[in-house]
Image (cartoon, rainbow, N blue to C red):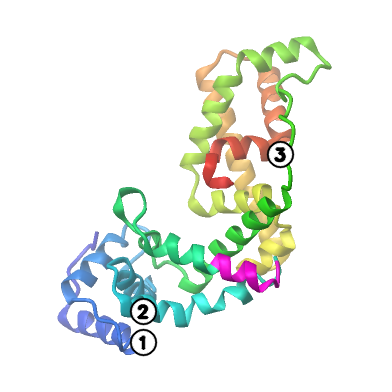
Amino acid sequence: MLDREPTAAEVRSLLERARGAWADVHVADDRFLAYLAERVDGTVDLAALRVVDLYLACACADGDARAHAAFERAHLGQVPRFIARVSSEPALAEEVTQRLREKLFLPGPGGRPYIAEYSGRGDLRAWLRVIAVRLALRLCRRAAATRQQPLEPDCWLAGANPELDYLRLRHRADVESAFHRVVAQLEPRAVLLLKLHYLDGLSLEAIADLYHVHRATAARWLAGSRQLLLDGTRRALRERLRLSEDELDSLLGFVRSRLEVTLRDALGAEAE
């Protein structure tokens, strides 16, 4: 919520900026200010938000056909360029674009379209680009799966050490529960980085390109996200179970070795 009511001059300036960018789109003053207030908390102030992008997103979330058309012209038309590193096939770009229209503008869980999830803390086009790339990667992965793969054997049975196998099987549900809880508590960017690398198969170079940062920065972000996840899981297990440090090392080492599978389980169907 807003710490204070903006002055009349501030409101006028915000609305003039937004309406100047989207002349064909109209959102009532009270509605737009309420939409802004929902996206301001103790970590970001009004001045830091992408007001022009949020104005368009607000109108799209309200189902304004002119806003949808403006979004199409300004952003969805860029989908082929967004996914060029994944594929240059026009058919894939067309399918990604259509799925984005449905995902962004049709009501989802709770009746809200996904475009309402845009927070205004970063560039709208960059936000859309990440979603488009992930969707293109998932579609390509599904297309490549021409036949059903055999069921994976139970990875929790390593077979080399019966005592470790027993430890893993005994605490399997505890490890999975702790891991899922920690994933749910991570910052959105940390979760997205883990998805991009472990589920979508993006290299550090591709992630750096996606975020327009140096490879070393992307590597640092990913390593930090992975460490937060593993450290959080270890803390949760230590609090819940009476295990020695060696036993915790064994369990966490196993989780680390199959992080992709464990993440896919934790993220569920959304990761597919």
Residue 213 visible at all: no
Disc assigned to residue 117 = none
Q: Position of residue 7 (x, y in %)?
A: 17, 77
Which residue, given by chain and number where applicable, does mark 1 sit on?
21
Q: Kindly report the secondary structure that dominates the magenta region of the rendered protein.
A: helix
Q: Position of residue 104 (x, y in %)?
A: 42, 63
Q: Position of residue 92 (x, y in %)?
A: 63, 67
Return the disc, 2 or 3, that comes first in the chain's sequence: 2
Q: Nearer the viewer, residue 125 or 208?
A: 125
Q: Secondary structure at mark 2?
A: helix
Return the disc, 1 or 3, that comes first in the chain's sequence: 1
Looking at numbered disc 1 in the image, what kind of residue is underneath it? Ala
265 horizontally vs 259: left or right: left
135 up-or-down from 58: above or below: above
204 horizontally vs 135: left or right: right
Q: Residues within 10 Å of mark 1 (few under 14, many from 20)?
A: some
Q: Residues within 10 Å of mark 2 (few under 14, many from 20)?
A: many
Q: CA distance from mark 2 to mark 3?
A: 46 Å
Q: Say if the magenta span includes residue 92.
A: yes
Looking at numbered disc 3 in the image, what kind of residue is underneath it? Gln
Image point 63% across, 44% down: which residue?
226
172 horizontally vs 66: left or right: right
Quarter in which the N terminus is drawn: bottom left
Which residue, given by chain and number where applicable, does mark 2 sit on?
52
Circle nearer the viewer, 1 or 3:
3
Disc 2 to disc 1: CB gap under 8 Å: yes
Q: Which residues are magenta?
A: 87-96
Which residue, given by chain and number where applicable, does mark 3 sit on?
148
Q: Secondary structure at mark 3?
A: loop
